[in-house]
Image (cartoon, rainbow, N blue to C red):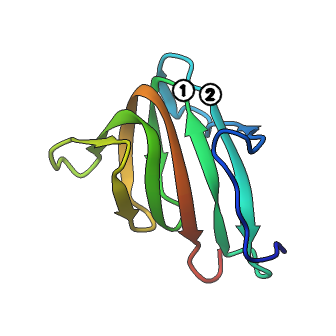
Amino acid sequence: MSELPAIGNSSTVPLESEDFAPGAVLEGSPRMMSHDLYVSPDERVFSGIWSVTPGKFHDVMDGDETFVVLAGRMTVAPDDGAPPFEVKAGDVCVFAAGYRSVWTVHETVVKGYHIELPAGV
């Protein structure tokens, strides 16, 4: 469990390397890193800082996620055939659990995130 308030600076918080799901990387060699600033006692709520270097990969949202892009630029192509859209520094995004898409990261993306996993996960 983490204590609140939790404060972190995206340029100084030590990010830890994360692995992509097998087969998720479609192009390039993106590197994913994160640091949880807060984890709820039941481990269903996470808030922190996440970063990924350029590349293309498939993403599935594990939980409802709200994030603010602090740096970088990417294109998100929804799996449901909806038109792709660009996400860039300054954007606030909200995705529902289960949302599937392909992310093409053009410039290293850094985001502050808040994730709520569904009950029973």
Residue 65 in percent (x, y) is at 48, 65
Residue annotated with mark 1: 53
| Cα distance in 3D space between marks 2 and 1 | 5 Å
Residue annotated with mark 2: 31
Residue 62 in percent (x, y) is at 54, 62
Q: Are marks 2 and 1 in contact (CB under 8 Å)?
A: yes
Seen at 67% across and 75% down, the residue is 44
In this view, the residue farthest toward the left is 83
**Position of 27 relative to 9 (above/below):** above
**Precedes in sequence: disc 2 or disc 1:** 2
Secondary structure under tag 1 reads: loop
Q: Nearer the viewer, residue 99 or 76?
A: 76
Seen at 16% across and 50% down, the residue is 82
Q: Nearer the viewer, residue 119 or 14?
A: 14
> Is disc 1 surrounded by few (<14), some (14 to 19) or many (20+) residues within 10 Å?
some
Considering the image in quadrants, where does the N terminus appear? bottom right
Q: Nearer the viewer, residue 41 or 80?
A: 41
